[in-house]
Amino acid sequence: MTVLKTSLRNFFAHKGRMALSAVAVLLSVAFVCGTLVFTDTMNTTFDKLFAVTASDVTVSPKSAGADDDGAGTGRPAALPAATVEKVAAVDGVRKAQGAVSSMNVTVVNSENKNVGSSTGAPTIAGNWTDSDLKSMEIGSGRAPRGPTEVMVDADTADKHGLALGDELRTIAATGDIRARIVGIVTWKVTNPGAAVVFFDTATAQRTLLGATGRFTQVSVTAADGVSDARLKKDVAQALGGAYKVQTAKENADENRQDVGAFMDVIKYAMLGFAGIAFLVGIFLIINTFSMLVAQRTREIGLMRAIGSSRRQVNRSVLAEALLLGIIGSVLGVGAGVGIAVGLMKLMSLAGMNLSTGDLTVKATTPVVGMVLGVVVTVLAAYLPARRAGKVSPMAALRDAGTPADGRAGWVRALIGLVLTGAGGAALFAAAGADKASDGALMLGAGVVLSLIGFVVIGPLLAGGVVRVISAVLLRAFGPVGRMAERNALRNPRRTGATGAALMIGLALVACLSVVGSSMVASATSELDKSVGADYIVMAQQQRIVPQAEKAIERTPGLAHVTRYKVVDATLTSPDGRTDDTGVTAADPTYAEDLRRTTTQGTLSAAYGKDAMSVGSDYAEKYGVKVGDTLSVAFKGGGTAKLKVAAITDDETSIDQGARYLSIETLRRYVPADRIPQNMIMFAKAEDGQEAAAYTALKKALADYPQYQVRDQTDYKEELKNQVGQLLNMVYGLLALAIIVAVLGVVNTLALSVVERTREIGLMRAIGLSRRQLRRMIRMESVVIALFGALLGLGLGMGWGATAQKLLALEGLNVLDIPWPTIIGVFIGSAFVGLFAALVPAFRAGRMNVLNAIATE
Amino acid sequence: MTSAVTIPRHGGTGERTAVAARARQVVKAYGSGETRVVALDHVDVDIARGRFTAIMGPSGSGKSTLMHCLAGLDTVTSGRIHLDETEITGLKDKKLTRLRRDRIGFIFQAFNLLPTLNAIENITLPMDIAGRKPDKAWLGRVVDTVGLSERLKHRPTQLSGGQQQRVAVARALAARPEIIFGDEPTGNLDSRAGAEVLGFLRRSVDELGQTIVMVTHDPVAASYADRVLYLADGRIVDEMHRPTAEAVLDRMKDFDARGRTS
């Protein structure tokens, strides 16, 4: 009881010193809880959406995606109208409605601007039926009738300023359709982002499926008293197993699974970053408790002298940690909900509709947050607590002074060196690995081991590194610089731990920046080496519709246009083994657009009649040579016997392992309406026409804003921007860990200032000016920050270079160290140090000289 | 009203006044209204140049406060303090700091040295902070005087308490300040080490012409001074020239007895 009382008193006596540790716990817990609440809320939103969009029972063609028939023709799989009648006749069916919907459309306004979602949510076109009234209502206007009328959802209308009477052009696989907006529908639940347009049934069938009398699904409503499961059984029986029949729940579950998988990726990525922040926070907590214990050595000695056991002392420190953990976590859980709301607002800015009404805080969320926060805090405080328990009763009698803590010790050195050595060896092994999968494991082990190793030997490295940094930077500042250096050096363990916290975040930044810029450099060099095409046309997610293909082909000034299709097919090797990775069908000019080296045969021969090429890996695995015949079963078509005319070298990152054949050959075995749309198209300008052709091509595609046309320069630029954007996002998430690390620097300085009160008083008494004092603290801070940065950047670049060596197997051939980023981060760290010292330096400067001297 | 003002006289060189520091009507009070505590009550005092002055008094008499005010560490409620010709009352922190740095030396009871600096670095610290080069010959003489030449590279933790205080004395002397203030400089030392330190202070006055003001409650320490001022309840109540330990002790007992009977 007394122990608890002492802990409580100590805690509140030093609450200022605990504040930053509490903030660190708070931030990490808040990030975890925020992530959970945000993803749960998203899931709730989707659940509600899917619950209202699913009919009691749905009937759809088997093995078909929602957007496609699986062959890539851009038209969804359909079932005949007769099926609807058959279902309607089943007992217990109140109503069976044929529905048409396709996600393979692009909707543009009269200025050819895409009105679809900007957040990656789909654009859906369909027929308006009564069953849609379950999830939506017509807000203004009326339902569409005839081929020139369309209805659009209110969110999309709002976002793009669409009103009744405006014209929309819907680009579908079978052609464009222009229609006037006659109605605007409003969702009854939150629709996170999909853009929806409705036509009447005949128009939808013609536009989206290419023919009337067909539907993509049958929405079945049960009669009163008939359960979904019963109805499903009866409908399935009536149809004889030719179709997929689902209850509302199954349908919603399936949809949810698709979204859920995506949400899980987001969730675990964000939790990973929260984990890094926690890791960094541990250093801060360890430092805080170490310093508190050190400052309280005499007091603890007294407790021991009057009869407290080691365990009691130990427990009293842990009790403080427990209290800190609880306070930090409770605040963190609250802040987490705030973060979730903030994220939702952010998503709204990005064009996503989310309603705070759906805010979902599961019971497990606060529990997870609390447990994590408390357990991590208490674990982090364990080592300092144990050290407190070891304080001898004699400490009470010794002169106070600042406790010396130099004993970094050879045990630590040994452990650290062994770990670092093992980590280095693992990294070395990873760099030399023959197979990416083996190497990845070694890389992971190397990263973890070298990180721990660096953390362990950090205090030992601090001596040397700080001296070097000081020699370069601080000597110019004379005695103030020298004192800053000595102060940074006086407790290597503290400097080491503070620097290590910063090291973690910066190591990841350095590693990712090296990998990212190597990716760009490798892709650029590969493009230079092998791509001969002048222009590349492609969309983010969609294939190229025939009308856009024609527009490209009609463009003047082009020497040739290459179509490139990815076709689902199963290959059977001469010895009967199968492989269903598919084939690539292209025009023969593709051999000029992408220069591939062959290990056997010539690539142009592969575009001959009934000929093809395979990659060297495949050839090796299946023992295939030029001249062998493979059996190729095309999905949606026949089976062809094709002769291998070339084997391409797989040492490349573009089109690795692709099997080429000509579109002519494809046509011989697959009916015209089952031929997939183009994935990408390439074009080459006539000599001297490059600039004009580029402009003409852009103009030709102005009607199709979903496609981008790029020449090689723009393509490289785009690639660089994409990687840059991805890196920026990751840096943004790592910022959390770096903020916690900066708090750690502030914490260390603030506690050091308190610890050195008398020293500061003495120096002020003998004539150190406030400005000099503040400068001294700032420089100490800068040195600690640069120490962390140097270690982190070094370690990170090592990891990055290893990863590149490993990924060279996957075509990441060029190592590119982004020096501007690395140097920028290093210099930035110095400023971070200055920033971290602001408050501690200010407070030290304000200290009353007399009180400082008088402090006993 | 109390006074310990000597008639101003001129020193041997005749260039400077013989008073190194003077306080006039200095009042230092804490709090206000009923809780007001007067630590210094209209004190007048002159500190003679080239002399060793001891300030004595019981705990709470205001002797430390007086020293802090004279040294520019503390502000006064009213009155004026001059260091030589400079009025220090009313100076801003920046000027006060520079004044302490360039013109005053300090020896505290404990914690005089920075643990991160070795002995010689501690000794030259005030000059380093000021960006001045120490006078090599003078520094050598000071170091020799305090007998530390062998231990200049030692850190404070490697020195005994007496040695640490000698380093503090050396630091105070090294910059040749106009005046050195000692706040019970031997309070933490045994009598032998204390005698050593006091011997150095005495010699620095006699041989180097240093001005020293020392707060103490130890009659033996006070006996090293040229003049002893007695403080009680924030007033100067007596003074003694060329004191001996016995005389000081007797005078103290006297005050104690008077204090008890009154």
Image (cartoon, grey):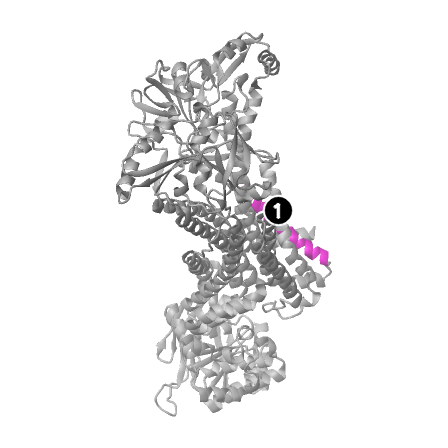
Where does residue A407 sit, x and y in percent of width and height? Answer: 63, 68
In this view, which residue lies farthest toward the front? A627
B152, above or below A117, in the image: below
Q: Give whichever of A568, A245 is nearer the camera.
A: A568
Q: Quadrant of residue A73?
A: top left
Residue drawn at x 56%, y 66% as measured from the top left: A461
Magenta-tinted stretch: A310-333
- How far across and down, in percent of the image, does residue A648 sit? 49, 44
At 58% from the left edge and 38% from the top edge, which residue is drawn? Answer: A366
Q: Secondary structure at mark 1?
A: helix
Indicate the amino acid at tag 1: Val
- Report the side of A128 relative to A794 (left or right): left
Rendered location of residue A726, percent (x, y): 45, 45
Q: Is residue A107 visible?
A: yes
Magenta-highlighted stretch: main secondary structure? Answer: helix
**Residue linked to disc 1:** A374
Q: Return the residue nearer the eye: B248 or A370.
A: A370
Task: Give above or below for A501 relative to B105.
Answer: above
**Depicted B116 relative to depicted A846: above or below:** below
Inspect the magenta stretch and tell me whether residue A559 lies in it. no
**Residue A293: in sight, yes or no?**
no
Question: Is residue A327 highlighted in magenta?
Answer: yes
Between A103 and A248, the one nearer to me in the picture: A103
Q: Quadrant of the C terminus of chain A?
A: bottom right
